[in-house]
Amino acid sequence: MNPTSKSSLPQVLDPVVAAVLEQLQQKVEAKDRVIAAKDQALSAAAAIIEQLKEALRLERIRKYGKQSEKLSDLQLALLDLEPAVSSDEIETETAGGPLPDSSENGQESDKPTEKQRRARRNHPGRNELPAHLERVEEIIPCTPEQCSCGKCGKEAKVIGYERTEVLGKKPAKYFVRVIMREKRACDCEEYGVATAAAPDRIAPKSIFSDEVMIDFLVNKYCDSTPLYRQRAILWRDLGIDVALTTINDGVLRVGELLIPMVGVMKRDLLAGGYVQADETYCGVQTPERKGANHRAYFWQYSSPGKGVVFDFEMTRSGEIPKAVFKDFSGILHTDGYAGYGDDVGAKGMVHACCMSHYLESGFIWSSFSKATPAGTELVTDSR
């Protein structure tokens, strides 16, 4: 045998040992493949996480406005935890500067940054309370020990006051208004009995005064306090237990009084040259459907610089916009809902459609341009 042809690896003469080594080699290779697959999956997951984090940041920037571009990710996360964030809160958060970074051990640094020191120097102090509010002074006297001099024993004189202003509040005072209408009669048989006229009220037969009813509306529509919670407040604070339908009837009565105003708003809206229209559904309980709500709709009509009119209807039928815009010849801006069809609007009306809605609905330019009524023009936007 030629010595130069010998391999550097040791030769295994036992076939059993060779088989075991082959199996071990195969197991090692299989584990290497599993580890490589897991590493690849981790890399893909890390890329997806980074993509989602960036998408979340962009969404927060879009949600909170231009000021949010100056905020850190931590500030955006704090704002995102709030159920409703106003523009003033965003500006305040922006003016306060970025939140301090955490140290490596997870604890915030106690040493203030230069921006924090500068912000403290420029802090305007407590906000001044409005001057038009009534001032009720409350004098807190010194203790008896403070009223006399500790050396000579003479009474100390008042030289001034340490003044602090805080916003106070008087709880609402409820009372029962007893309306007594005067009744008059005469001994003469021809006179009879005369009774003073009843005062004008929003709901003449209701147990609530006009002020209480207006308070119901302000709490419900301005402060987002539902009527059932206001009913619970009356029971908690005054021990008055009234049916929810009683409060609801009063609110509906106010709505009836506002119907003429809504009519004026709608006429003013249609008298202009541009109207935006949309509709959204809401569940309504009806006697016909037990255990399920009927799908009704709020039709919304608006125009920039004018009011917004909500028209409640039990249907989404195209007959609704047909009746509303039968004499309208301006620009009607809608989405891709087919209810705003060819027969909606007077002659010369321009139907301004949203291009994205039409494309999502599967329309193409040729299909809905041919559907344009004669004498009208179809306009699209890029929103």
Image (spheres, helix red, strand yellow):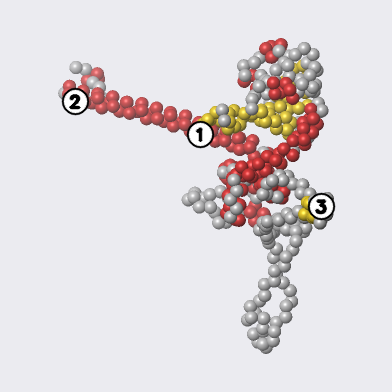
Q: Nearer the viewer, residue 372 or 84?
A: 372
User: What is the quadrant of the C terminus in the image?
Assistant: top right
- Give the numbered dot on residue 315: none
Q: Which residue is mark 3?
A: 189
Q: Nearer the viewer, residue 16 or 100?
A: 100
**Residue 230 locus on image (x, y percent):** 61, 48
Q: Is residue 121 above or below residue 28?
A: below
Q: Nearer the viewer, mark 2 or mark 1?
A: 1
Q: Name the mark nearer the viewer: 2 or 3.
A: 3
Which residue carries the number 1 mark? 49
Give the x, y percent position of residue 362. Answer: 62, 16
> Depth-wise, is mark 3 or mark 1 nearer the camera?
3
Q: Would you say 362 lies left or right of 272 here?
A: left
Q: Calculate the distance from the C-alpha at mark 3 to the C-alpha at mark 1.
A: 95 Å
- Dividing the picture into quarters, in which one does residue 249 lie? top right
Q: Mark 2 and mark 1 in contact? Answer it, CB < 8 Å.
A: no
Q: Residue drawn 63% across and 37% down?
A: 63
Residue 379 in view: no
Query: In terms of sequence position, does the residue under pointer 2 or pointer 1 come before the other?
Result: 2
Count of picture labels: 3
| Amino acid beneath label 1 | Ile
Q: In the current view of this chain or complex, which residue is farthest to the front?
A: 189
Q: Is residue 89 above or below residue 353?
A: below
Q: Secondary structure at mark 3?
A: loop
* Residue bearing the label numbered 2: 17
Left or right of 115 in this view: 34:
left
Q: Quadrant for residue 136, please give it.
A: bottom right
Looking at the picture, which amino acid does disc 3 mark? Glu
Percent x, y of residue 218: 69, 46
Residues at marks 2 and 3, CA–CA distance in whole angstroms: 136 Å
User: What secondary structure is marked by label 2?
Assistant: helix
* Corner quadrant of residue 12: top left
